[in-house]
Amino acid sequence: MKTSKKLSFPKLENEFLENILRQLVNQHTIIQMFFTKQPSPLFSHLIIHIEKNIDAEQLQQNKWVKKVRKHYQIDVYFIYSAKLHHRFSLGHPFIELYCQPSALIYQNSAAVNPLIITRDWKKYKKKFNAFEERFYNDHDLHKVQVHNLISENSSNSVFTSYARLIEYDLEYLEELYLANTFNSLSLEERINNMIGYLPEIQKYFVRNSHSKYYLTDLFIKAKEATDDDDAIYKNEMYEAVGIAEQSLYRLIEERFDELKKRIKKGLFEKQEVACQIDEKPKDIILDVAIETIVKAVEVEQIYLYHQITYGEKMTYYLMLIAIGTGNEKLRLITQSLQSKTGGKYDFVLISHNRSWIQKNLYQSQSFFAAIIQDKYLIYSSSQYHPEFHWEVPHNPYHADLYFYYKSAKNSALQFFAIATNTKENCQGLDYLFSLFFLSFCRTYIFIKTYYLPNYLSSHALWELCIYADADIRKYNYMIEQFWTDFFPYLDKHMTLHQRLSTLKKSEVDQMIVIVEKLVYELYNLVIEGGLLNFEEDEKEE
């Protein structure tokens, strides 16, 4: 037998790994090693054929295996002899492709049972077709069970059955990419494991946190509800879960096709790495906006969902899917953009993280669905961001509208109480005026779009009102005629300043007109529009 010093693995081009393999050959009964180099950033495969299962399990846990995977993009897989030959007999395409004689970098001449593949595609074809057919047949059985449960309207069982079907899909993806399964791991862990081999899988599962997913949490809740004889009613999520599962199914189909083509040709085709985004926007102002936003926050995607020109000023409406982007950060970014563009452009920024949007689709889906479209996407940090699990059918409703409307109306009444006081005590009036405007804008936007914005700047909220319904711009003349800069004045009084008021009567009169007009506008929307019967609500109190 050759000594470790004489062993050489030039195909690896990795001295660190070569040294480890020499030690392995000396210390364990290694039968064969197969190495297939893949183009970066894909994982290359090193398959180590070993005699005993216990040795394979122990060696797979070595720290150097993870180190080689992380630093050199080489996936090391130990497989014991009986398992390798069994999978070969089943026509497993991963084994057929990656254990070809051309991939052999070491073989123990004293080994009794090495794997030697000599058959060509014609001889292997029946094996491949049988292997592929087993997947499709079993998948169809799972799918029929799910559809039967949907027809019975048994929501808990539907989701637990979908969970089993998605686990089945993941098992096949693991087999086709790794020739191994990880049934002992949770669904989240299995999804996370697959991302390194199949980044596209990220597109089909919205994250709740770094390692948790919205759909897997839904499956857990369904199981817990079933165990407790409770019921969950998420029928509108059936299609979203179905889309996620169908996407995994498509990935399996594509992997089968890829393996089939490679085995038939007996060589590896160069794989193209997809671009980050189709092309950068040509609008120089958008280039500035994207560069500024990306430097300021951890943003995943930016959507330009609306732009208008009013007078000589262009306004860009941008939605950010980002992490940790609060109102103050948006305000600073907006100021920076206005400064960089010489004050010639306005920017209306809203921002939410992906998990928040997903959890609030029950109410705001119509708003977000109109924005989150490929035609509006101007920046994406990755091509593998998860797609939202849209509710189908979606029935939007104005949850808590009563409280928002009442808050806005009461703010107006409090304002009038002070503004019309004959003693002209205007203490706090500027605060109440700002509070009313804030309440009006959020309620108006909510009524028109089913989206309740954060406590943005007064200017951003007013621009969102115009986006919600351009007819509201008819009141712009009052804002333009205000005795001072309207929006900075409101933002200044979003918090109460304890000092004597110096408001003139003419100034208060202007405030009164604006409040009267806008509260009447809200009344027409909510009461005259039949959204609420506010008078009856007040009688019940």
Image (cartoon, rainbow, N blue to C red):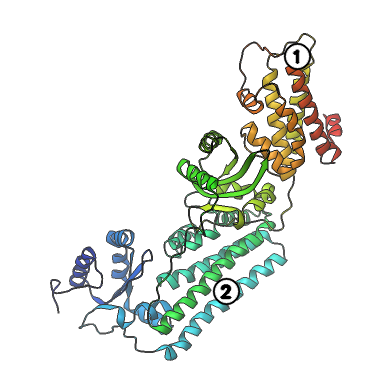
Question: Residue 139's image quarter?
Answer: bottom right
- Residue type at mark 2: give it: His
Along the line of sight, the residue nearer the viewer: 297 or 224: 297
Single out the mark in the foreground, 1 or 2. Answer: 1
Q: Is residue 449 above or below residue 185?
A: above
The mark tally for this picture is 2
Q: Residues within 10 Å of mark 2 (few under 14, many from 20)?
A: some
Q: Is residue 413 above or below residue 49?
A: above
Q: Position of residue 24 (x, y in %)?
A: 21, 69
233 with respect to 205 (left or right): right
Q: Position of residue 353 (x, y in %)?
A: 55, 46
Say which residue label 1 marks.
505
Q: Secondary structure at mark 2?
A: helix
Along the line of sight, the residue nearer the viewer: 69 or 312: 312
Q: Is residue 36 above or below residue 469?
A: below
Q: Position of residue 341 (x, y in %)?
A: 53, 38
Disc with the residue nearer the chain's start (1 vs 2)? 2
Q: Is residue 447 above or below residue 226?
A: above
- Residue type at mark 1: give it: Lys
105 with respect to 275 (left or right): left
Say which residue label 2 marks.
139
Pick the quarter of the image with the N terminus: bottom left
Task: Looking at this view, name the residue that lies furthest to the front.
Answer: 312
Task: Identify the residue shown where x is 74% and y is 18%.
Answer: 508
One can see residue 275 in this view: yes
One can see residue 180 in this view: no
Q: Secondary structure at mark 1?
A: helix
